[in-house]
Image (cartoon, rainbow, N blue to C red):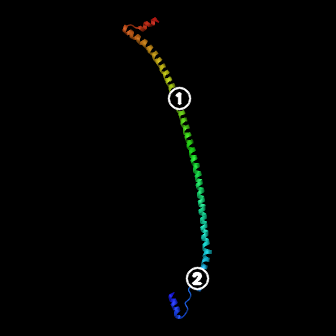
Amino acid sequence: MMQYLAAAAEEGEKPPNFLIPNGTFFVCLLIFVIVLVVIRTMVVPPIVKVLDERDAMVAKTIEDNKSAAAIYEDADTQYRAALKEARGDATRIRDEARAEANEELAAAKRRATQEADAALAATSESLAAEGERAASTARADVERLSATLAGRVLGTDISAEKEKVN
């Protein structure tokens, strides 16, 4: 700028007043205003629209997250209640099964005891009958054997004499 002022002073011209704008300033100002209007009308609205849509999506996502959290809490509460009820039912069923098993075990023990008593009674009767048969056979054999033995000891036939007596 100094060179321009020095050149203007040598030519005898009056140096321009730098506070008064010249035509270049107005042309630059006009270009700036045109670019500003173009940006404002063509660039900014789509960007604002995208940002507004994004804000709406973020707000909807936050709302969905809150509703999902509430649904999750409800489902978790229902799940815990159902789990507690199922555990109670399982305990009740297990207790009923144990009671039924104990009853069946007691009934099986009673049946086994009755069968054992019946088998013992049958065996006792059978042994008693066999004992009676064995005793009667032994008595019959004892008489015959004693007669034979007595006959051998005495040297006589006692069975013939016994027949004479009868």
> Mark 1 or mark 2, which has the lower sequence index?
2
Residue under the image location 60 percent in, 72 percent down: 44
**Is disc 1 in contact with disc 2, using a CB cutoff of under 8 Å?**
no
Label 1 CA crowd tier, 10 Å (few <14, some 14–19, many 20+) = few
**In the displayed image of the protein, which residue is found farthest to the right?**
41
Residue under the image location 54 percent in, 35 percent down: 99
The residue singled out by tag 2 in the image is 28
Residue under the image location 59 percent in, 57 percent down: 66
Q: Is residue 22 shown above or below 93?
A: below
Q: Left or right: where does residue 131 sit relative to residue 46?
A: left
Q: Left or right: where does residue 57 sit relative to residue 6?
A: right
User: How far across and how far down the image is residue 165, in percent?
Assistant: 45, 5
User: How far across and how far down the image is residue 117, in percent?
Assistant: 51, 25
Q: Left or right: where does residue 156 sit relative to residue 33?
A: left
Task: Give the SS element for disc 2.
Answer: helix
Mark 1: amino acid? Arg
The image quadrant of residue 157 is top left
Task: Give the SS element for disc 1.
Answer: helix
User: How far across and how far down the image is residue 82, in percent?
Assistant: 58, 46
Q: Is residue 134 shown above or below 89?
A: above
Q: Is residue 143 shown above or below 76?
A: above
User: How far across and how far down the image is residue 38, in percent?
Assistant: 61, 77
Label 2 CA crowd tier, 10 Å (few <14, some 14–19, many 20+) = few
How far apart are the alpha carbons under marks 1 and 2?
116 Å
Residue under the image location 58 percent in, 52 percent down: 73
Q: Nearer the viewer, mark 1 or mark 2?
A: 2
Q: Which mark is residue 110?
A: 1
In this view, the residue in front, 15 or 109, is: 15
In this view, the residue in front, 157 or 126, is: 126
